[in-house]
Image (tube, helix red, strand yellow):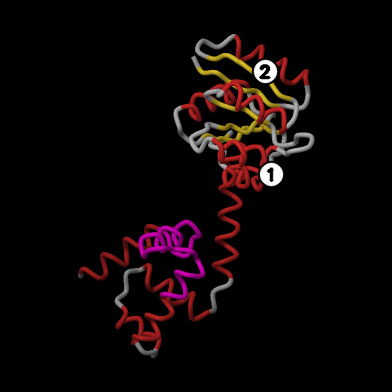
Amino acid sequence: MINILLVDDHAIVREGYRALLAKQAGLQVIAEAADGAEAYLRFKECNPDLMVTDLSLPGIGGLELIGRVRQRCPDAKILVFSMHQNPSFAIQASRAGALGYVTKSSPPEVLLRAIFEVHAGRHALSPDIAQALALEKLGSERMALEALTVREFEILRLLVEGRPIESIAQTLNISPKTVCNTHYLIKRKLGAASDIELTRLAIRLNVIDLLELADAGRAESQ
């Protein structure tokens, strides 16, 4: 049985979701709270297996509540259930210590699945938030790519084709040391920790596609 603390400032919302959870085998709401301060007290009293909380709460907000709960109990399982569809809220909730984020516009089965996932210690996102986060990440990566100079972009293209440093230097009429230094700067600007990450990023942003990469590999082997 998964014992749940349900936190939301609207009584009618808590009533509706308490009824939903009561119908599910293995789930039960053992305590409720209408604000952050009350939620923290209930958590200390009941020690629930999982806390489902909104972010917009009177007084102590949801993010502060998550932080306090995780400070008291580092292994606490917390799922955010919020009206906010902005991915920034999901990012902040994750940084505070929540394992899951589900929007209130999601179907009931999404919430239920997330409860079991978070209780098992796994991350869970509703599909709309997962898509928004992916698009935001892609947008930030594109901005980073556009921040590359023309020379950096050209070296990136040649690197992900698998061209050796010496070959790139000869092609661009620069020193191998300059290529190596630029290689490092490119990875730092794009947040790539390795050449494999750099190649995946280049493919994702259409700097080079898999067919071009395969053709370049065949040309090198001939």
Amino acid bearing label 1: Asn
Q: Position of residue 23 (x, y in %)?
A: 59, 9
Q: Which residue is drawn at 78% across and 18% down?
A: 12
Q: What stretch is highlighted in magenta?
A: 184-209
Identify the element where label 1 is drawn: loop
Q: Residue 88: x, y in percent?
A: 66, 48
- Return the disc, 2 or 1, that comes first in the chain's sequence: 2
**Main secondary structure type of the part rendered in magenta:** helix
Quarter of the figure that contains the C terminus: bottom left
Q: Identify which residue, 208 or 112, lies in the foreground.
A: 112
Which residue occupies the foreground of this view, 109 or 77? 77
Quick one: 139 or 168, which is closer to the camera? 139
Answer whether residue 28 is magenta in the image: no
Instruction: Determine which quarter of the picture holds residue 201.
Output: bottom left
User: Which residue is at a point 72% across and 27% down the rendered structure image?
Assistant: 8
Residue 193 within the magenta-colored segment of the rendering: yes
Type of the residue with mark 2: Tyr
Q: Which residue of the protein is positioned furthest toward the left in this rendering?
A: 222
Separation of marks 2 and 1 at Cα, in angstroms: 22 Å
Disc ID at residue 17: 2
Is residue 61 depicted above or below 4 in this figure?
below
Q: Is residue 169 left or right of residue 101?
A: left
User: Which x, y percent locates residue 27?
Assistant: 54, 15
The spot of residue 143 in percent (x, y) is 60, 65
Residue 176 in the image: above or below residue 65: below
Residue at mark 1:
86
| Mark 2 Cα-neighbour bin, 10 Å: few <14, some 14–19, many ≥20 | some
How crowded pointer 1 is (Cα within 10 Å; few <14, some 14-19, many 20+) is rated as few
